[in-house]
Amino acid sequence: MHMLFFPELIVLLSALVMFLVSLGSPGTAAVHRLVVILGAAVLLATVACLGQEGMLFFEAYRIDRFSQLFKLLLAAAALIVLLLSGRNPGIKTEVQAEYHLFLLIGLLGLMMLVSSVELLALFIALELSSFAVYIMVPLRRQSGGETFQMESAIKYLLFGVMTTGLMLFGMSYLFGLTGSTYLSVIVDQLSQLIAEPAALVAILLVMAGFFYKLAIFPFHFWVPDVYQGAANETTTFIAAVPKIAATAVLIRLVTLAGGDSQLVTPVLLICSIGAMFYGNLCALAQKDLKRMLGYSGISHAGFVLFGLLTFQNEGYALATYYVAGYALMNLACFLVICTVATAGQNLAIEDLSGLHRRSPLLALTLAIGLFALAGIPPFVGFTGKFMLLVNAFKQGLVIPVILAAINTAIALFYYLSVVRIAYCTDPHPGALRLQPGLTRSLTAVVLLLAIIALGVIPGLLVQPAVMSIGAML
């Protein structure tokens, strides 16, 4: 049985190691090397436990193919974040060890989230991951006397606490209606109660907490300020890793409603289309690269919902595939941001002028990442959007599919404008050539190969996702 909890134990032990390291005065390079080794150990542990199945903690914690697949995606994304962040120039030197301690605690919470099948376990895992990230945001190094990271952290915390209150309120309704906090019992009970207004309110309130994590309209309002205010490394983590876990939990919660609900589907549809239009239209006006990627993330969350609102295994599997692809595309873009911003500063889109001359590899990484986000073939973004829209079209969602296609056209404009600046302009006077180190160069190559491979051969991830979701249900 101890193997069932093995990945989480390794993350917990890694966090403990970073805590002990933080008691001394370690050098930045030593901390980075150590945390990369710990991240690799976590990834190996998740690979070793892929086939595990069982129940723990009075059946509140379920280990199955579904949870183990998402833990693998979480561990891989977290390791890539650690590799591309380098020596974290945007984080205060004296708190490097503490920063990585909180990052690992956040990862532990997210891993626990995807295995939790009981309301209180879900709540504890969500709060563990959330508060760790809340603390990571204000650890940014001050630049030019500005302290906007503090404002971002306070907004993130206050909005998070508000949505947590909504979620707890919904959980209390679910418990009152069904007499249980276990999702398996709630599913059985709700099949008879789903027409009751209280049941629908309960499901929607609980979903609100995870909509906040996934930055779905109308719970998106924290995104641009937090993306801009947090250090580049922290934003990379927030942009990629929590969204994977949030998708897993939303899939579990959507199965509570089932396909019979006449209210949950329209709500998901409104949130999906609203996220796409709001995110894309706001992204058009952005000058700061991280803010633009933040608004773009809101629109991509709308595409993830497209997979959920079909209430079918295939749709859930495609949502899993899309969010994994989105993480890869985002990580490719943030690798460029972290490398170009040598002092950890925020990048304006204009700062990428002439990037193809300063570093051809970085320019290629940025271009492919943005092409994939825009939905240009043969990359994973195109394949994911195409499969999601075809699946939704089969379910009769014709008008939403047309609206989503319009949004893809809008997004092309701002993604390609960044590529134009990187490739069709000259570097600013005095701009230095960029030499990404061996680690970052290899990470960039791996990301590019993964974006292309998953786009050309989607079955690499879709088939395991279909199997894991079948096992969950």
Image: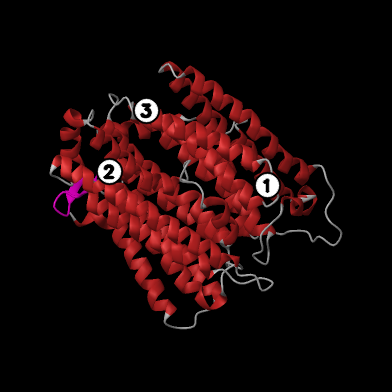
Q: Which residue, as the protein is rendered here, is positioned at the far right?
A: 429
Residue, x 76% and y 46% (percent of image)? 422
Q: Which mark is residue 237?
A: none
> Is disc 3 in contact with disc 2, using a CB cutoff of under 8 Å?
no
Give the Cα separation between the discs numbered 3 and 2: 33 Å
Q: Quadrant of residue 437?
A: bottom right
x%, y% of residue 404?
A: 54, 27
Counting labels gives 3
Which residue corresponds to the image point at 60% horizontal and 65% vertical from the top-left? 148
Find residue 286 and name its label. Answer: 1
Q: In the rendered structure, are the residues bearing label 2 and label 1 in contact, judged by CB atoms less than 8 Å apart? A: no
In front of the other: 409 or 322: 409
In front: mark 2 or mark 1?
1
Can you name the residue that lies furthest to the front here?
A: 197
Magenta extent? 53-64
Residue type at tag 2 = Gly
Decide: few, some or many residues near mark 2? Use Cα within 10 Å; few <14, some 14-19, many ≥20. few
Residue 51 marker: 2
Q: Earlier in the sequence, mark 3 or mark 1?
A: 3
Q: Neighbour class for label 3 at 10 Å: few (<14), some, many (≥20)?
A: some
- Asked if residue 79 shows in the view, the reply is yes
Nearest to viewer (mark 3 / mark 2):
3
Is residue 338 toward the left or the right of residue 303 in the image?
A: right
Residue 265 is labelled as 3
Chain-order first, disc 2 or disc 1: 2
> Label 2 to label 1, Cα distance in Å?
45 Å
Q: Amino acid at mark 3?
A: Thr
